[in-house]
Image (cartoon, rainbow, N blue to C red):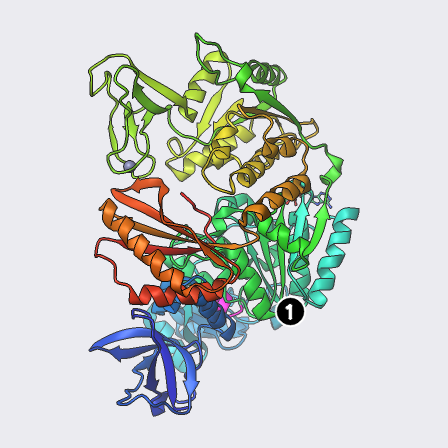
Amino acid sequence: MKFARVLVDRSGGSALDYSIPPELEGRVGIGSRVSVHLRNRQELATVIELLDETDVPGIRPLDKLVTERPILGPNLLRLARWMGDYYCCPVETAMRAVLPQVVRKGDAFKQRLAARLTRPVDDALIAEMEKRAPKQAAIVETLRGAVAEGTENEPPDTRQPGFMPVGVLLKQAGSDRGSLMALTRKGLVVLESEIVGRDPHEGETFIHAAPHELNAEQAAVFEQVCRALDKPEKPILLHGVTGSGKTEIYLQGIQRVLDRGQGAIMLVPEIALTPQTVERFKSRFAAMQREVAVLHSHLSEGERHDEWHKINDGRARIVIGARSAVFAPVEKLGLIVVDEEHENSYKQEDPPRYHARDLAVVRGNLEGCVVLLGSATPSLESFHNSQSGKYQLLRMTQRIDDRKMPYFRIVDMRMEGSPEKGPAIISEKLRQAIEARLERKEQTILFLNRRGFSTSLSCEKCGYVAKCPNCSVSLTFHRAENRIVCHICGHTAIAPAKCPECKDPGIKYSGVGTEKVEETVSRIFPKATVRRMDADTMTRKEAYREALSAFRSRKIDILLGTQMIAKGLHFPNVTLVGIVNADISLRLPDFRAAERTFQLLTQVAGRAGRGDVEGEVFVQSFTPHHPAIQFARHHDFEGFAEQEIEWRKQWEYPPFTKMVLITGRSPHEERGRFSMETLARRLRELLPPNTTIADPTPAPLEKSHGNYRFHLMLRTHSVLKLSRALREVLAKLTFPEDVTVTVDVDAYQLM
Ligand code: ADP
Ligand code: ZN
């Protein structure tokens, strides 16, 4: 092959051809990272094709190879292309997600010099050396203590010499570089520069945790998983209630894959990627701890680089990580697990706006491996796929040890509160339930997904409402700082004591946030220890850990917080969960509002009664008969799904169609609207069949960060065709400079 077609990292999207110079012949492969000349600049690029000929005139040679071996396998390259086509974004944008920035640059290896004996050395030789060259003898003696990995437990004469970093060696031996060099000249010692892996978990030891013996339900599911591993056919959806032992299935599935000499990726939502989760994995695979790579957003660039290469070189075969781990370059991939597959955090909200669960399915297809999606509340998309036969559905209906599901009590808030005191925050029934827990020394969790003290501030006299100057939302009052804050753009001002318009002192704070619940609960239960966990109190990482450990050791009676406490936490002493206001998520202008509420209630309820005592869940709501609440109460996912799917079908919402949301933003309202109307008109001419387009409308969040926002919603049965049409139209249209247009395929964020 004489030519390479490359994608330049920073370019408009077209592929460019370069010739392969003789010195690089045979070393350039698909996926190689190279540097090329483009418009008088050195640019980094990825080889996407090798060609025998090209008709491009005036072709130039590649400058050099950035890394010796191809860094992107053919399947990941295909995945990147598919992303570009499907999510309607340039391939380089997709590539940026597939290859971490620090890997693309290709030079962040941390290297150090290490020394090793070339052969085993006996005492006699050292004694001999000591007479003539004591400093050399000291080095040899120290190096004898370094044993190669994997031979530590063998008898002394078969142990292989191991490497020691030169700095450490000279210090321990009390010797110098000159003596070391003398030894290398004699051929007794070799020096090598070794790549130092920055293991984020270095120095921690994990005690091996043996697999559990599977119960009957798990065993039946596991058998199906093993059958799929032998002969991958279609993705598996594992619907298992909270605590039914899904994670155990994942762990044993991964073990099975390793036994077959393959690797595995385990995706978890970022918020669930806690030390607890990682520990559970590292403990199960303690014997091969170094083979477990962890990818999450808190890694330093260096750590990310090292973890990535550890996987790419095959030194790590198990990858656990948040959504971007779906791109982990695992060789011989046998299994991709997506835990909590319904989680919205799998959707990336910046370009490329991919959904990691969907990419897992696409990648599984490319690699011919098994994809296992698990959840207690599957997304309706996945559930629908299992109904239509696209996925295989497996169920686990019992909690381990037959623990009971928590008991739901719905509190009709229309009956609470009084005209004098206004609406109640904690109903009488919930109050009694908390009191009973305090008496029995059991713990309570209260959930409210809204920060701050009051969520709106208005003047009853003149009708003034405190609104953000940049966004179309009310400002939230934060009492601790005595400020009013915009939760969208962060705009803040001192809380006014009287109405800024009419100067009336009777300005009214209303709407309840976590800060207010904290105050109320502390007032009702003065003796209880109450702790609030939300983005305002948990500004430091340690604060989060500290609060959880205090709660675990029962120093806190009532833990109160936002979604931060909704997921993945296990506290056996919690027997009561209160959902302060179930209506918040129900009222969102989003066709998934009911689905989200059902998921949220089920998830939060899963925190109750994990110990020996049955748990109780109190749901406070002004719409107590809403199906999302009623089905959650009866732990009836399938009942909920059936009804909700019927409704979606009637209105042609996903999963019956795919939704593509186009957002136009501009500081000028009219220009924004006009641009979107033009776009809609052009699109109508080119739309593939089975696609509907609505008129552009102001977005529910009409203004944000000073920009007016307009939505154009499309629904289609063929995303690939629609994406192609969209790309064509967008390429031809030029919008005014201050108008930005973004395309979100399979949108989840509809505000
Ligand atoms: P899920 O992921 O479905 O919520 P987990 O896998 O976390 O459930 O299991 C819940 C608890 O039960 C965990 O503490 C786990 O160690 C334990 N467990 C799982 N399977 C078994 C089993 N077969 N026997 C005993 N304990 C188990
Ligand atoms: Zn704002």
Residue 311 within the magenta-colored segment of the rendering: yes
Q: Horizontally, is 678 left or right of 428 in the view?
A: left
Residue located at (74% from left, 49% from top): 218
Magenta residues, as a range?
310-314
Residue 739 visible, this angle:
yes
- Asked whether 587 or 211 is in front, the reply is 587
Q: Horizontally, is 200 left or right of 255 in the view?
A: left
Q: Horizontally, is 361 left or right of 452 in the view?
A: right
Position of residue 695 measured from the top left corner of the image (x, y, whole percent): 38, 50
Q: How many marks?
A: 1
What crowding class fits label 1: few (fewer than 14 Cα within 10 Å), some (14-19), or many (20 or more)? Answer: few
- Asked whether 16 or 227 is in front, the reply is 16
Residue located at (35% from left, 65% from top): 729
Q: Amino acid at mark 1?
A: Gly
Residue located at (37% from left, 23% from top): 453
Q: Measured along the vertical axis of the image, is residue 550 above or below residue 75?
A: above
- Asked whether 284 or 125 is in front, the reply is 284
Q: Quadrant of ligand 1?
A: top right
Position of residue 499 measured from the top left corner of the image (x, y, whole percent): 23, 18
Residue 172 visible, this angle:
no
Position of residue 748 measured from the top left corner of the image (x, y, whole percent): 46, 48
Q: Quadrant of the N terminus?
A: bottom left
Does the magenta stretch mainly form a helix, a strand or a loop? helix
Residue to which mark 1 is pinned: 261
Could you tell me which secondary element the residue under label 1 belongs to? loop
Q: Quadrant of the C terminus?
A: top left
Quadrant of the rendered structure where residue 53 is?
Answer: bottom left
Residue 617 within the magenta-colored segment of the rendering: no
